[in-house]
Image (tube, grey):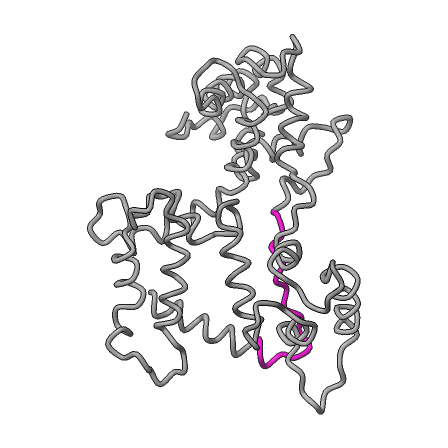
Amino acid sequence: MIRLLLMCFALCVVYATSKPTEKKDRVHHDEPLSSHEHDDAKGFDYDHEAFLGREEAKTFDDLTPEESKRRLGVIVGKIDENKDGFVTEEELKIWIKKAQKKYIYENVDRQWKDFDADNDGMISWEEYKNVTYGTYLDDPEPDDGYNYQQMMMRDERRFKTADRNGDLIANKEEFTAFLHPEDYEHMKEIVVTETMEDIDKDGDGFIDLKEYIGDMYNHEEEMEEPDWVATEREQFAEFRDKNKDGKMDKEETMDWILPSDYDHADAEAKHLVYESDANKDGKLNKEEIINKYDLFVGSQATDFGEALVRHDEF
């Protein structure tokens, strides 16, 4: 499986270099909380998808109000992480982010069994290294042109960054941070470092205009330069290179690939608290949330049928 992944990676590289007019996007975009417009006057579909995640929201659409309220009560207990009987904006934000990242966790779950060789519920660096690079370590200079030793060193550095307690053993959350570093605050610097290493061809620790364009556009003399290349040169001069020294440093690169424009989960958490906080104490109790169940999960159908089949978590 791992060998297949590496082959797929190699094919992606070949494909990218064979399409000189195709723009490469380094920016890590936040997933939208919902496909619906956020307008409570028209309905609460946006809030449902933001709070539950898109797939889970569909399961609530066909429940009776009574069953929706019951399930919402179960969810409230999960959101209240410190078990003080209240749900804060921060706890809501954490929950919403988890709901939106469910697809990431499912991806991690699929890969977990491939790396947890001893089935102890943890993945050590040695386990990951042996599964991923074991067959290549015996041949430090393979014929395919890839430097697996260098790739392994980068993976080890990222693994150590994700490993918060420094024991070189990853639990599920640490392994998720390793596989999806752009989604974790403490991993953002390593994402920037890896990006700069890929683009900074002269190794001076900066990304100049030539390197910036070269990463997106594989120039071939016989081909006319596409219009978007000129636009990117303007973007570099006007927005990427903030201090106008002709190159991007780490901070400027982070602003480019990991923009922190707007926290949708934070805004939605504030909205849910504002709309549901009956006593205006800045936090929600279970009763306040259940009373506004239509905002959080509101079911609309009265048909029982298959929709009322309970999932294990409920």
Which residue occupies the foreground of this view, 310 or 90? 90
Relative vertical location of residue 134 with respect to residue 186 in this rendering, above or below:
below
- Which residue is outermost to the top? 279
Which residue occupies the foreground of this view, 222 or 66? 222
Percent of width and height locating residue 209: 70, 72
In the image, is 236 to the left or to the right of 54?
right
In the image, is 80 to the left or to the right of 212?
left
Percent of width and height locating residue 193: 52, 61
Residue drawn at x 27%, y 79% is 139
Relative vertical location of residue 204 with respect to residue 295 in this rendering, above or below:
below
Residue drawn at x 79%, y 67% is 234
Which residue occupies the foreground of this view, 79 or 127? 127
Residue drawn at x 75%, y 31% is 39
In the image, is 5 to the left or to the right of 240?
left
Residue 136, quarter of picture: bottom left
Q: Is residue 21 shown in magenta? A: yes
Please tell me whether the stretch drawn in magenta is mainly helix, strand or loop.
loop
Residue drawn at x 63%, y 64% is 25
Relative vertical location of residue 62 with respect to residue 130 in this rendering, above or below:
above
Residue 241, quarter of picture: bottom right
Percent of width and height locating residue 150: 39, 71
Q: In which quadrant of the rendered image does the N terminus lie?
A: bottom left
Q: Is residue 266 shown in magenta? A: no
- Which residue is outermost to the left? 118
Question: How many callouts does the rendering have?
Answer: 0
Which span is picked out in magenta?
16-30
Q: In which quadrant of the rendered image does the C terminus lie?
A: top left
Percent of width and height locating residue 44: 68, 28
